[in-house]
Structure formats: structure tokens, C-alpha cells
């Protein structure tokens, strides 16, 4: 196949080669000039700058020696002054020797020799100064030494400084001369490069004017056609003006638009149908729903959520940020509680007011990631209405509280009556009657414990309980608990021991509620501890919290129940009916500790015992 001599490739190659040649020439000239500048600057910095720096250090050492002389006269510690003078002498001579070895200019050589002559005279004068006795400021020797310093040493000091200044100015003069030389090289180089740049710009301008229409005209036309295609107009065609590569590009572009038009006719309908179907499904979901993009802007909301908007306008909500949309809805007061940026699944319960009525929603945030060339994500937020469940739960709690209150009075009467019968206040009973009365008493007391736990639980769940937060020492609550259970422990043959790790800070909590938690844990420990064993109560401070532990030597709790035992009505299987509780105490204890911003948990080993822990913030940290 015969090559086209006027092909786009050949024309661009010619321009490219010409530009490369010019760039190479510019680069060679620039490198040559930069090398000259580098050598000049290097000489400028290395020789004269270092010389000036050494002269400055010699000047500083000389001034320090003058200060040492004054200290020698006025200070009582003469040996330190002499030693400091000698150290500065060593420094001065070290810099002097280095400077002497680097000087090659005759004028500067005379300066450096004169500096040494004057400096040695200055040093000799210090030796003469040491012949005076300066220990007594009132003596004549002291005044003579001071006069000698002012009339003889001080002029010699100034003379030595003058010689140093002459050498320094000589170096500065050489430094400026080299600087002027560098400026001259830079000026000439800049002018040459400027001419080359003008020449290059002129060539580029001519090439640009010659090829702009021929080269970029078709490209511009194709670009405009692509914009039209992006807007949905697939009927655009490019005009073929050349037979080079651009002509082939226009031909292929026309073929592509033809195929796209045919493809659109066959697939657009089905794609739009699927999109509309998905949109309709989301819109018809009964629970309020939002879909956010990666930047947490609302891309879609269903009809149920739109009903909760204060200002229902799609233009103000779609493509707006999540917090802006929430600010215009019934969730404006609780939007800060919703973790819409969660990296994984999150849910939480919020309470709002809608039509002057309280409503509860369980908000579920589900981040979703997918691959579409690159990692992308969006967020689905669903608001489940749990108001009915909350109302039923409140009704159940109120019902349990009412029943428990109604049970309380007759239970008290039954227990008191059983005590009277057992104490023979109304007559003697035989053994069988006493056994029946004792059974009534025990069953009534167990039922009374159940009623008390139900009452306590209903208070906690209904949020009607009021906590009295006051600072106190945790050992006081432990002591009160131990005092209550000590008689029972003695009857069972069980020891109760307390341990405290150092001086503990106070906690800001409800004293009676913390005692209630301790009573529940110790009561459970006594149930499962046998005769001769020990129940241990310890407290320790760590990382801003007080940690309390109640430990027993009972049969232990299976691992699968370590979390469940803090749920309501859960009892560990395998326990005797006599020792089995109501299954409410630990649930109430967990609610109380959680209300104090603490944590409660259990660790246990089968056949070795259990350890119940709870924490409280020290000194009120975290209490609101």
C-alpha cells in the first residue's frame, strides 16, 4: 500500500522533530551557562563566605577574651578566668591557622600577619595583667590593674579588632567582585535564552497558524458532535474533508453513531422499564426510606418519608445533604442521634412528635458498596415505626407494676401471719402444722422477692425512677451490703471478705441503687456457695473508673449463658428449685449500672465459681 505523503502523522512528525532540535539547542546552551554560573557561585560561597565566617569567629573569641580580662579583675575566681582565656586563645589560633593556609592574595597575607602580631601583643598584656593583685578592690594594686586595662589593653584590643575588620572587608570586596561576575554571566545567558525563546515562539506561532484549521478543524467538529451525542442526539454526522488519519477518524465516528443509534432503539425501552420498576418499588415501601450517595446527599426518598417533611418539595430535598433534609422534617430534633456516616450496619431508636403525638422509630442505616469500574457506595436509611410496640410495652410494664402493688399488701399479711403462727403467739402447733406454716412462710418470702424485683424492674423500664446522684466512697456501699448479709452468711457457714486496692476516689452515683446492685450480687453468691467457702468483694481504680468484683466458689455458669443471664426471666438450667431466683435481679442491676454510664458483666469457670464485675465512672466522670 502506498504511503500518503501528506498524512497527519508525517506533518506532526515534522513539527515534532523541529521542536526537539530547538529544545536540544536550548538545553545545551542552558547547561553550558548553568555550569559557568555553578562554578562562579561555588567559588563565591566556598572561598570568601567561609573566610568571612572564620574571621567572625576570631572576632567573637577576641571579645570573649576581653570579657575574661574584666572577670579576672572584678571576680574572685581568677583561675576560671585564666582557663577561659586560654580556651578562647586556642579557638582564635585554630581559626587563624585555617585562614592563614587559605589566603593566596598578597594584600590579604599582609593583613593576616598583622593580625597575629597585634593579637600576640594583646595576649602578652593579659600576662602582664596577672602580675597585679586584684583580690582587694580597695587596694592600690586593683586600681593599677584597672588603669592598665583601660589605658593599655583596651587600645590594643581595638587595634586588633581593626585588623580583623580590614581582612573581613577585603573578603567582602572579593565576594562582591565574584557576585558581579556571576550577575554578568546570568545577564548574558538570560539574553541569549530570550533570543532563542523568541525564535522558538515565532516558529511555533507560524506552525500553529498553518495547521490549526487543517489539523484541529475536524477534531473540533467531532468534539461538538460528541457533546450532542451525550445529550441524546445520535443523528449527528462528521463531514469528511481529508483522506488522512483525521478523515478515517471521522468515518469511524459516523459508523459509531450509526451503531449507537441502532443499539438505543433496541435496549433503551427495556432499561427505562427496569429503572421505573425499581423506582416504583422504592416509592411504594410503607416505611419511610432515604437513599444517600457517597457524599451523603439524598438521591431518592419514598412517599412515606415525604409525608414527614415540613416543606414537601422535591426541589429542596433531592440532591440536598442529609442533615439539611432532616432539618426540614419531623426528625429535625433527633437528626444528630442518627449515625448516617456509619461504616457498617447501625440502628437506634429515636422519639419524635408528629401531629402532637409521640412516635417512636427504629432507624436502620445500611451502607452498601458495589464495583462499577471503581469502588462506589451509597447508604439506605429506613425508619421503622415501633410506636405500637412501645405502647404495648408500656401497657405491659404498667400492668406488671399494678399487679405487683396489688400483691404486695396481701403478701405482707401472709408473711406476718405465718410469723405469728410460727412463734406460737396464738397457740401451740404440732410438728406437721409447723412444717406447713414454715412452707407457707418460705413460699411467701420467695413470692415477695419476685414482687419486689418486678416493682424495681417496672420503675427502671418506665423511666419514672429518679436517681439521686451524690459523691460517696464505694467502700461505704460495700460495707452496708456486707453488714446486711453477715448474719445470713454466718448461719450458712460462709465467710464474706472485702478487698480494696489503695485509696479509691469517690463515685457520683445513687447510693441506694448501687447498694441494691451489691445486695443482688451478694445474695446470688450466697445461694451458690457451700459451707466453708468464701465470698469475696473487691474494688479497684483503673483508667478513670471504679471496678467492683463479687466472687464466689460455686458451681459456675456455662459460657453460653454469660451474656443471657442479664436478660429478663433468664435462669441457668440445672439449679435447684430452692436456689433458683426470679430471673429479674440481674436485668434490673444491668439497667441501673447502664443508667450510671457503667458496665456489668460476668466471668465464670465451671466447678470453680463465678466473678461478677461492674464499673462506675470515678468522681462523676460521664454522669449527666
Image: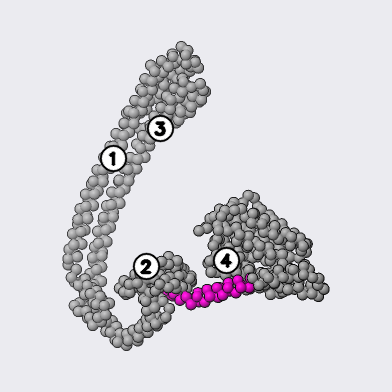
Q: CA distance from mark 2 to mark 3?
A: 70 Å
Q: Mark 1 highlights which residue? A: 179
Specify start and end residues of the magenta stretch as a single range. 380-408
Q: Is residue 392 magenta?
A: yes
| Callout 2: SS | helix
Asked which quadrant contains residue 95, the reply is: top left
Which one is earlier in the sequence, the residue at label 1 or at label 2? Answer: 1
Mark 1 Cα-neighbour bin, 10 Å: few <14, some 14–19, many ≥20:
some
Q: Mark 4 highlights which residue? A: 591
Point out residue 191 in the picture as x, y percentages from the top left corner: 21, 49
Is residue 369 visible in the rendered image? The answer is no
Which one is earlier in the sequence, the residue at label 4 or at label 3? Answer: 3
Residue 327, label in figure: 2
Q: Mark 3 highlights which residue? A: 57
Residue lying at 23% horizontally and 74% vertically, measured from the top left: 224
Q: CA distance from mark 1 to mark 2?
A: 68 Å
Residue lying at 57% horizontally and 66% vertically, measured from the top left: 591
Amino acid at each position: 500500500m502506498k504511503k500518503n505523503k501528506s498524512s497527519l502523522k508525517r506533518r506532526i512528525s515534522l513539527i515534532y522533530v523541529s521542536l526537539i532540535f530547538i529544545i536540544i539547542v536550548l538545553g545545551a546552551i542552558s547547561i553550558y551557562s548553568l555550569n559557568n554560573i555553578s562554578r562562579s557561585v561555588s567559588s563565591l560561597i566556598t572561598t570568601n563566605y567561609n573566610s568571612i565566617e572564620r574571621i567572625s569567629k576570631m572576632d567573637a573569641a577576641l571579645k570573649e577574651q576581653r570579657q575574661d580580662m574584666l572577670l579576672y579583675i572584678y571576680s574572685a575566681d581568677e583561675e576560671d578566668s585564666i582557663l577561659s582565656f586560654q580556651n578562647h586563645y586556642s579557638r582564635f589560633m585554630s581559626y587563624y591557622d585555617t585562614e592563614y593556609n587559605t589566603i593566596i592574595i598578597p594584600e590579604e597575607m599582609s593583613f593576616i600577619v598583622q593580625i597575629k602580631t597585634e593579637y600576640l601583643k594583646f595576649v602578652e598584656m593579659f600576662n602582664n595583667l596577672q602580675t597585679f593583685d586584684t583580690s582587694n578592690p580597695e587596694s592600690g594594686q586593683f586600681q593599677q590593674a584597672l588603669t592598665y586595662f583601660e589605658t593599655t589593653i583596651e587600645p590594643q584590643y581595638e587595634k586588633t579588632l581593626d585588623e580583623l575588620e580590614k581582612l573581613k572587608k577585603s573578603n567582602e570586596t572579593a565576594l562582591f567582585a565574584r557576585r558581579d561576575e556571576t550577575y554578568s554571566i546570568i545577564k548574558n545567558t538570560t539574553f541569549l535564552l530570550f533570543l532563542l525563546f523568541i525564535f522558538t515562539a515565532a516558529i511555533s506561532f507560524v506552525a500553529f497558524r498553518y495547521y490549526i484549521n487543517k489539523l484541529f478543524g475536524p477534531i473540533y467538529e467531532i468534539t461538538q458532535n460528541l457533546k450532542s451525542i451525550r445529550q441524546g442526539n445520535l443523528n449527528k454526522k462528521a463531514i469528511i474533508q481529508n483522506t488522512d488519519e483525521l478523515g478515517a477518524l471521522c468515518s469511524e465516528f459516523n459508523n459509531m453513531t450509526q451503531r449507537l443509534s441502532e443499539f438505543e432503539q433496541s435496549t433503551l425501552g427495556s432499561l427505562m422499564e427496569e429503572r421505573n420498576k425499581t423506582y416504583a418499588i422504592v416509592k411504594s415501601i410503607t416505611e419511610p426510606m432515604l437513599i444517600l450517595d457517597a457524599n451523603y446527599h439524598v438521591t431518592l426518598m419514598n412517599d412515606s418519608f415525604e409525608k414527614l417533611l415540613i416543606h414537601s418539595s422535591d426541589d429542596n430535598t433531592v440532591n440536598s445533604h442529609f442533615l439539611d433534609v432532616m432539618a426540614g422534617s419531623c426528625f429535625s430534633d433527633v437528626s444528630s442521634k442518627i449515625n448516617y456516616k456509619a461504616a457498617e450496619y447501625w440502628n437506634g431508636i429515636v422519639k419524635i412528635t408528629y401531629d402532637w403525638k409521640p412516635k417512636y422509630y427504629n432507624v436502620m442505616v445500611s451502607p452498601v458498596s458495589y464495583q462499577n469500574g471503581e469502588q462506589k457506595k451509597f447508604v439506605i436509611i429506613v425508619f421503622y415505626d415501633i410506636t405500637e410496640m412501645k405502647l404495648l410495652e408500656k401497657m405491659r410494664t404498667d400492668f406488671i407494676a399494678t399487679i405487683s402493688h396489688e400483691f404486695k399488701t396481701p403478701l405482707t399479711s401472709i408473711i406476718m401471719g405465718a410469723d405469728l403462727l410460727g412463734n406460737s403467739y396464738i397457740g401451740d402447733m404440732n410438728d406437721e402444722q409447723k412444717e406447713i406454716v414454715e412452707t407457707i412462710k418460705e413460699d411467701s418470702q420467695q413470692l415477695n422477692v419476685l414482687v419486689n424485683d418486678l416493682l424495681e424492674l417496672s420503675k427502671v423500664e418506665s423511666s419514672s425512677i429518679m436517681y439521686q446522684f451524690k459523691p460517696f466512697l464505694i467502700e461505704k456501699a460495700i460495707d452496708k451490703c456486707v453488714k446486711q448479709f453477715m448474719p445470713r452468711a454466718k448461719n450458712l457457714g460462709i465467710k464474706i471478705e472485702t478487698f480494696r486496692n489503695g485509696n479509691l476516689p469517690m463515685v457520683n452515683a445513687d447510693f441506694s441503687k448501687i447498694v441494691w446492685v451489691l445486695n443482688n450480687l451478694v445474695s446470688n453468691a450466697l445461694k451458690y456457695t457451700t459451707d466453708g467457702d468464701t465470698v469475696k468483694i473487691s474494688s479497684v481504680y483503673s483508667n478513670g473508673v471504679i471496678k467492683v468484683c463479687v466472687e464466689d466458689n460455686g458451681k459456675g455458669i456455662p459460657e453460653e449463658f454469660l451474656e443471657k443471664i442479664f436478660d429478663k426471666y433468664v435462669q441457668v438450667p440445672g439449679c435447684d428449685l430452692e436456689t433458683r431466683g426470679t430471673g429479674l435481679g440481674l436485668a434490673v442491676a444491668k439497667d441501673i449500672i447502664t443508667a450510671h454510664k457503667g458496665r456489668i458483666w460476668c466471668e465464670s469457670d465451671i466447678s470453680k465459681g463465678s466473678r461478677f464485675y461492674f464499673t462506675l465512672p470515678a468522681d462523676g466522670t460521664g454522669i449527666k
